[in-house]
Amino acid sequence: MDHAAKLRAMAAIVAWIGLLACVYGIAEDPQSQWDFRTYYQAVHSLAAGGTPYGPIHPHSALTGEGGFQYPPLTLFLFQWTLLFSLAGAKLIWLGAKLAAVGMLAWIWRRDFERVNLGWLVALFIALGFNAAVLRDLVSGNISTFEQLGLWFAFGLLVRERPYAAATVLACVAQFKLLPIAFLALIPLVRPRDGWKSFVAGGAVFSGLLMLNLEWSATLTHQYLSLFANDNLRMDERGIINPSSLSLFRDVLDLTSYAPGLPYNRVSGTIAYGIYLGMLGLMVSWVWLNRRAALRQAEPRLLVYLGCALFAIGMPRMKDYSYILMLVPALFVFRDLTRREIRTDYLLIGAGLMVFAQPQQTNIPGLTAFIYMLQAYLPLFMAGAVLVYVLGALERAAVASPDAGRRVSVPLGLPIAPPAHGAAARAP
């Protein structure tokens, strides 16, 4: 083993020891996994004859009222917690999530990007997008399992099993509902016959939701009341919910400091609606003017495109939900290293030096600007990934010698020849 290989091995060992220490700290902290504690208390409340949608305070440091936020039938998946104490159930939940992370890495490596045990990849997966994976482990949310289901469905889709992918997506979306938007990937990846499986997935999703009403109309009504405007949990903002809707509300909230410009949430919602309309127009323009590039595109790039659109378009995108963007970003970083670095990228990197500035400054407006950059960095990164993937699709279409045929890109290889014109290396 040469000196460089020894250094890489030592770095990997140090990185994994650090990550294991983080996991141990999560397991030992009685206040951690507060979202799971909410699930635990909701199931026990239902078993005792109460409602699972009542106010729950799972963490002493959290403000406001928490509570179970998923459809009634999802409670059945937490019935196993009735057999254990809270401490025991939390350990089981954490262990299961670590196993899910391992399965995610296996799916990513099999169908999308090379994911190995090296220290760079390990730290990127753990710390990328404001440490989305670690945030999910700490909070105890279901997001890791949700992502496992989503990427399993994406894997089925790129392996040309659209009906199975649609069924899995319909089941995964029963919790947070918004992931059902990924059904739109099926006709994008399979433009000739994908609409059939798209409709089938929508039917499965709707049918499962209707079962909630059949099982308990009362609990279903209580669940629907969570979406009322007075539910402050639906207006979480900043680093814990760096979504586009939250960004618009935060930006317009700054107008409350200007005389004569009062703020209300409706203004932020209207701005978000305009943004969604513009995003829809952009997607329509790309579809109409780049249809050939999309039809030739390699399926995994279309999945990355869908992930980025989901991240920048959804009204609610919690910090741990950005696990979704890890693999698309990994593709971008690896592809960038194989291309000539333009001056533009260096200027952007230099511009990010603003993070070295203290958040509190005496320069008018700079404090708020730095806060926005820091809190909504995952959202901005998702937007950058979207732009890059669109360019990658265009470059792949131009480089393809056979128009009308999909470009098959080996994992980890550049999707186009280097900028100086040399041919791409063979695998």
Image (tube, rainbow, N blue to C red):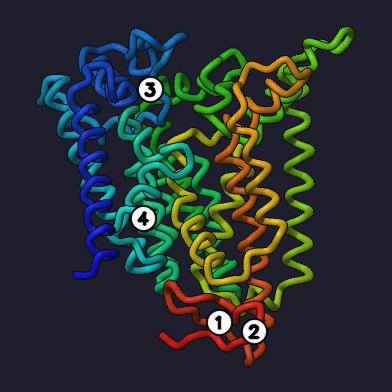
User: Tag 4: residue type?
Assistant: Val
- Mark 1, residue position: 407
Q: Secondary structure at mark 1?
A: loop
User: Tag 2: residue type?
Assistant: Ala
User: Tag 3: residue type?
Assistant: Phe
Q: Mark 4 touching mark 1, by CB under 8 A?
A: no
Whole-number angstrom distance, CA of label 4 to CA of label 2: 29 Å
- Mark 2, residue position: 399
Measuring from the top left, give residue 372's x and y in whole percent. Answer: 65, 28
Left or right? Give the position of 347 relative to 95: right
Whole-number angstrom distance, CA of label 1 to CA of label 3: 45 Å
Whole-number angstrom distance, CA of label 1 to CA of label 2: 9 Å
Whole-number angstrom distance, CA of label 4 to CA of label 3: 34 Å
Q: Nearer the viewer, residue 109 or 153?
A: 109
Residue 156 visible: no
In the picture, the disc for residue 121 is 4
The vertical placement of 250 against 424, above or below, is above
Measuring from the top left, give residue 411's x and y in whole percent. Answer: 42, 74
- Mark 3, residue position: 68
Identify the mark nearer the N-term, 4 or 1: 4
Picture residue at 60% right of the left edge, 87% below the top = 422
Measuring from the top left, give residue 207's x and y in whole percent. Answer: 44, 46
